[in-house]
Image: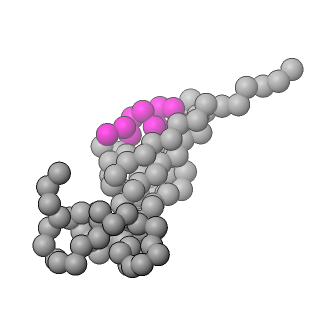
Amino acid sequence: MTHPSPPSLLGVFAHPDDESLLSGGVLACHAAAGARTAVVTATWAPDSHRAPELGDALAVLGAGEPRMLGYADARTPESATWDHCSPGSARPSSVCRTSTSPPPSM
């Protein structure tokens, strides 16, 4: 007799805190019911000051360890810890700019 594997739920968000504000109840409910849950945030780097905060939130929600992709937040360019605009970088050129002015509105 085979046992079905537990369901999985992956939340993908732009910023730390989005997981709690937008779907914290859903993540916690599924985790409590036995689902494997995980969260990925696109902005902020794993060694930034937001990582421990995100880790604490994910522990409460039952969503494992933080997975932070490290893209710079448009309003906080220093949120990425590497030069995402250097040649050979995996970062899209659309986030690279040479001035310190804010990016154009989309």
Q: Please, what is the dominant secondary structure of the magenta stretch?
A: helix
Q: Quadrant of residue 25?
A: top left
Of residues 67 and 97, the one drawn nearer to the viewer in this rendering: 97
User: For the magenta stretch, what is the residue range?
Assistant: 22-31
On the rendered image, what quadrant is the N terminus found in? top right
**Above or below, 6 relative to 54:** above
Q: Relative to 93, is 38 above or below? A: above
The residue that appears at 55% across and 51% down in the rendered structure is: 64
User: What is the x, y in percent for residue 11?
Assistant: 45, 42
Residue at x 45%, y 73% (from the top left corner): 89
Residues 74 and 56: in front is: 74
Q: How is the image coloured?
A: one colour
Residue 97 shown left or right of residue 48 in the figure = left
Q: Residue at x 33, y 66 (%)?
A: 93
62 shown above or below 53: above
Q: Quadrant of residue 84?
A: bottom left
Residue 62 image position (x, y, % from top left): 52, 44
Q: Nearer the viewer, residue 24 or 38?
A: 38
Q: Is residue 57 left or right of residue 100?
A: right
Q: Position of residue 98 (x, y in %)?
A: 22, 78
